[in-house]
Amino acid sequence: MSREYPSRPILGVGGVVINGDSVLLIQRDKNPGRGIWTIPGGRVSSGEPLRDAARREVSEETGLVVSIVDTIKVLEIIVPDQSGVPWYHYVLVDYLALPTGGELMPASDARDATYYPRDRVAAMDLLPVTKEVILTAFDMVDRVREAEKTQQY
């Protein structure tokens, strides 16, 4: 199925990779969104479990191996053309992911891949939904860290 003017929504996944107090972003090298910074991700293959697809996409675009922690958000992106017809239509499942191996280097359809500190995310030129998903991922990590501290006492 074509990405442009699809006959039905395309299912995709994203991996919000948190390392310490930084998030991994890629700069897209293909449309939709060529040149924008975003989280690594892509289309789910037929028969592929969602979490496996998220791990694969992160690895293909960044060279990293990740573990998937939990679902952050399910969202829908519809980009109409000038006449209002859906040019792109995606249903995306974004996951919180933690790096477990590999070597960071942009690959596949990523022009660049870099970790950005949490305190820079709000000021970055990112799509609002991308910022929201990233900040939600950091909140999830904070809750886990706080729970771990509480259990240690």
Image (cartoon, grey):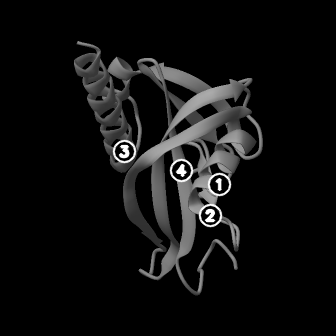
As drawn, the label of residue 14 is 4
Amino acid marked by disc 2: Pro
As drawn, the label of residue 133 is 3
Q: Please name the residue that numbered disc 2 is placed on.
A: 49
- Of the two numbered discs 4 and 3 on the same chain, state the one appearing first in sequence: 4
- Of the two numbered discs 4 and 1 on the same chain, state the one appearing first in sequence: 4
Q: Position of residue 17 (x, y in %)?
A: 52, 34
* Residue furthest out toward the top: 153
* Residue 66 figure quarter: top right
Mark 4 or mark 1: which is in front?
A: 1
Q: Please name the residue that numbered disc 1 is placed on.
A: 52
Amino acid marked by disc 3: Val
**Left or right: 5 as drawn, with respect to 65:** left
Amino acid marked by disc 1: Asp
Q: CA distance from mark 2 to mark 1?
A: 5 Å
Mark 3 crowd level (few <14, some 14–19, many ≥20, 10 Å Cα): many
Check disc 1 and report its element: helix, strand or loop. Answer: helix
Q: Position of residue 21 (x, y in %)?
A: 41, 18
Identity of the residue drawn at 58% across and 61% down: 50
**Left or right: 78 as drawn, with respect to 52:** left
